[in-house]
Image: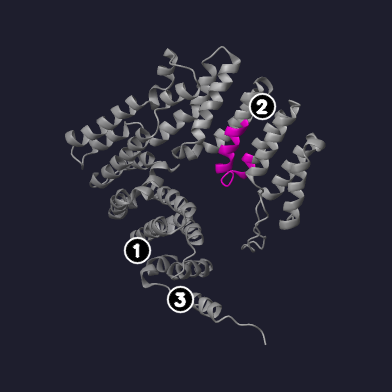
Amino acid sequence: MPFKSRALEVNLASYHVEVSIDPRYLPLQEAMSRYYGLMEGVNVFLTELSHPYKNWKFIVQECRKYALDYFYIFQKHARGPEVVSLIIDVFLSAVAEAAPDVRADAVDNLLLFLQKTVKDAGPDLPRFYPVLEAAFDRIPQLPPDHFELFARSFYSTKRLAELCLLVSPPLSTFSALNRLVYRYHQYTYTYWLSQDDPMTWFETEAEAGHLPIFDEIFAEISHPKISGCKNRLDSLLETEAVESIALLENLLALPTYGQIVETYKTLPMTLWKSSENITRRNHWKVVFLFHIMNVSGLSLIHEDALREINRTLSWLIDNESHRNIMLLIQKTFSILKTRTREFPVTALNCALNMGKGVYKTDESDLVNFFIDSVIDLGFQTPMLGGVGNDWQIHANSAHIQNIRTWMELIELSPKWSTRLLSCLIIHLCLEGVFM
């Protein structure tokens, strides 16, 4: 008689529930009802949305499709504002309930959808004003860990506000939008003031002391500059009416989160150009790149920073002392270890290029230290995850790249790479290979 687990049966039964579409989603059904070929997909989406155990990743992907691809249908439909309100509510629910990576997607898609609504509604836009203003009112009231996703999004709050400023006829009142932009700036300046002052940090870490040129290089992201912006922000609320267009125009003149990130992005190369000494300029560049990688608020440029570290390390390994190379390896791998989940291929490329430089030194203890670091970085397993809608097996795309990277390192010097080869064989025996 086959073994049956009562606990398993109860658990499975709890997930097998009869689901009917919640009546509050009927406006979307009604708006799409003329398009018979699309209705099956609409009903699948709304059924999932009505399920007590929601697949938020699927919901956010589908909601993006209806929000961006079919807005022209909602724009003219009598219940269009209700549909737009429903879509906004779905994205905000995902921000509150979904896993962190899905939350970020929901925020990006919501900001993009709000921009699209303002841009594409044309003469129908006044019908959507109450819905937009309700969204502008809800977003600033989110908890800090949710609102920060809006502040850090690629789809800037400033861009949304600029679009609202340009539409004709203008919004009936700017109160809700002004509160949103104010909260955005407030978060921005509070966050950057909570971080180390970049010039002070750099002077200490690079052991450079204070040079007059640093005042100019770091001016736009220095604590005094950002403190001045925060003081200006607070004074605006005292001098301008919250519903006024003048307040919005003044708020939009302040530096944004994205502008600060962009300044950080250009700074490593600015530092590189600021010295005549080629060793010093590469050292300064890589030190600040390490700083960028350790600031969570710069996540938008972390992959670019990793690539720059990759390029700069090759030169430094060829030209630095044995001791400094070991410190570079240690620092780089501590960063790679925290970022390899987000950027596995970039991290592997960085390890490979570093390895090529390290093996060239012909220093066995340096190579051994590097191999220890590579092994400690971990191995990208196949991570098979079922079959997708396209009938392709879900697997870790970095798995084969990891095998190739380790094989290339081993080929550089097989006799020095026996431990790396042994680890590779063990991983392949335990986890297999998925091509």
Q: To which residue does mark 3 refer?
A: 19
Q: Which callout, 2 or 3, points to the residue nearer the camera?
A: 2
- Separation (CA) of disc 2 from disc 3: 58 Å
Q: To which residue does mark 1 refer?
A: 79
Q: Amino acid at mark 2?
A: Ser
The circle on residue 113 is none
Q: Position of residue 19 (x, y in %)?
A: 45, 76
The circle on residue 314 is 2
Q: Amino acid at mark 3?
A: Val
Q: Is residue 113 magenta?
A: no
Which residue is at 78% across, 36% downward?
Answer: 416
Q: Which callout, 1 or 3, points to the residue nearer the camera?
A: 3
- Separation (CA) of disc 1 from disc 3: 25 Å
| Residue 356 seen anywhere in this rendered image of the structure | no
Which residue is at 31% across, 31% downward?
Answer: 253
Sequence-wise first label, 2 or 3: 3
Q: Which callout, 1 or 2, points to the residue nearer the camera?
A: 2
Sequence-wise first label, 1 or 2: 1
Image quadrant of residue 151?
Answer: top left
Q: Which residues are magenta?
A: 329-347
Sequence-wise first label, 1 or 3: 3
Colouring chosen for the image of the structure: one colour
Q: What crowding class fits label 2: few (fewer than 14 Cα within 10 Å), some (14-19), or many (20 or more)?
A: some
Q: Position of residue 409 (x, y in %)?
A: 75, 37
